[in-house]
Image: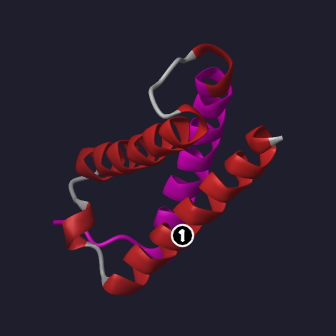
Amino acid sequence: MVVFSEQTILEILEYLEKSIKNLSKDTFENLELEGGFQGRMNFLGSQFDIRLENLLVAKGSSTHHLESGMKNKIIQRKQSILQDIGNQYKN
């Protein structure tokens, strides 16, 4: 188990934000999912979680090993990213 610094988590979150925002462009322009807008948002939320876990595992850890403060930062950042994407594509 690896203990991450706050800076490392911020770098991972910045990478994830870019990745999910790029994916959102393809998702809303090309991907057909059940559930329309909300289905696409659910897909992006799931992809955020999957990609986060994959990044952490590659660094020798997991979301289960993060302290609650870091988990809260991740949750807040995820909500912020998805809200920005939702606002961009809702119109």
Residue 77 as seen in the image, left or right of residue 59? right
Residue of label 1: 7
Q: Residue at 43%, 74% (x, y): give it.
A: 5
Which contiguous range is marked in magenta? 1-27
Q: Residue at 55%, 72% (x, y): give it.
A: 76
Q: Residue at 58%, 30% (x, y): give it.
A: 23
Residue 37 as seen in the image, left or right of residue 51? right
Q: Residue 56 versus residue 48: which sits nearer the camera?
A: 48
* Residue 50 position in % (x across, y down): 33, 43
Q: Residue extending furthest top?
A: 30
Q: Secondary structure at mark 1?
A: helix
Q: Residue at 57%, 40% (x, y): give it.
A: 20
Q: Residue extending furthest right?
A: 91
Q: Residue extending furthest front?
A: 35
Q: Amino acid at mark 1?
A: Gln
Vertical placement of 29 versus 21: above or below?
above
Q: Is residue 16 magenta?
A: yes
The quarter holding residue 91 reads top right
* Residue 8 position in % (x across, y down): 48, 64
Vertical placement of 23 versus 60: above or below?
above
Magenta-highlighted stretch: main secondary structure?
A: helix
Q: Is residue 39 magenta?
A: no
